[in-house]
Structures are given as structure tokens and as C-alpha cells.
Image (spheres, rainbow, N blue to C red):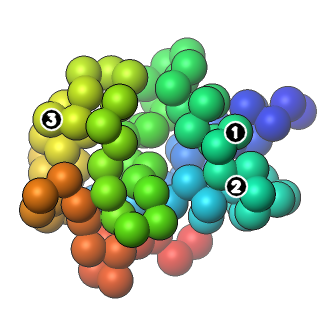
Amino acid sequence: MTLSEKIYNAVKKIPYGRVATYGQIATICGNPYYARAVGNALHKNPNPDEIPCFRVVNSRGELTKSFAFGGLNAQAELLRAEGVEVIDGRVDLKKYQWRG
């Protein structure tokens, strides 16, 4: 299995209404230093309908300014549709982070 496939499989596990960080997904994939690789893979997400990359945020809970599927507002709208509160481009990790 390629690293990208591992990343996509991990992201598919993030539950509805929760978020994970790039570093968290990297750790799940075997190396906490792969956070940039996670971002790169998600930017090339081959199936955004099945791989919910919008649920991945940075370590401060900030949304990506270069969300590949519609930009910052699209990511915020998708998260809000799942009940995740987004304030000033950020989510509260204490409240919404997946602990998987």
C-alpha cells in the first residue's frame, strides 16, 4: 500500500462532526513527520466524496487557506454542515478533534 493510500484510508475513518490534524493522520500512517505528505496527498484527493479531506486541519485547528475543493469558505461550510463550529477560520480541537 502506498503512503497516499494509507493517508486516504486514515482520513476515511474520521467520524462525521470531527476533525483530525495533519500530524495526527501522519502518525496514524506510521511517521509523525509526514504531515506535509498528508497535505500533499489531500490536495490531490482523487475522490473528495469518499475521502473527507475537509475534516483535516492544522495543529492549531486552522483551516487550510488553499483548500483544493473550493477554498477556505468551502471547507468551513462543509464542517459547519456537520455541526463543527468554525470561528475565524479555526475549530476548537478540544471540542472537535477525533481521538481515534
Q: Which residue is mark 2?
A: 26
Quarter of image, res 48: top left
Q: Secondary structure at mark 3?
A: helix
Q: Nearer the viewer, residue 39 or 29?
A: 39
User: Residue 65 location, x and y as percent?
Assistant: 30, 37
Residue visible at 23% across and 60% down in the picture: 90
User: Residue 44 location, x and y as percent?
Assistant: 56, 20
Residue 29 seen anywhere in this rendered image of the structure: yes
User: Residue 87 location, x and y as percent?
Assistant: 11, 62
Mark 1 and mark 2 in contact? Answer it, CB < 8 Å.
yes
How would you rate the neighbour count of disc 1 (Cα within 10 Å): few for under 14, some for 14-19, many for 20 or more?
some
Quarter of image, res 31: bottom right
Residue visible at 61% across and 64% down in the picture: 24
Q: Nearer the viewer, residue 51 or 45?
A: 45
Mark 3 and mark 2 in contact? Answer it, CB < 8 Å.
no
How would you rate the neighbour count of disc 3 (Cα within 10 Å): few for under 14, some for 14-19, many for 20 or more?
some
Q: Give the CA separation, mark 3 to mark 1.
A: 23 Å
Residue 37: numbered disc = 1
Q: Amino acid at mark 2?
A: Ala
How would you rate the neighbour count of disc 2 (Cα within 10 Å): few for under 14, some for 14-19, many for 20 or more?
many
Q: Amino acid at mark 3?
A: Asn
Residue 73: numbered disc = 3
Pick the quarter of the image with the N terminus: top right
Q: Give the CA separation, mark 1 to mark 2.
A: 8 Å
Residue visible at 51% across and 26% down in the picture: 43
Q: Amino acid at mark 1?
A: Ala
Residue visible at 76% across and 57% down in the picture: 33
Q: Secondary structure at mark 2?
A: helix
Residue 61 horizontal side relative to residue 8, left or right: left
Q: Give the CA separation, mark 3 to mark 2.
A: 25 Å
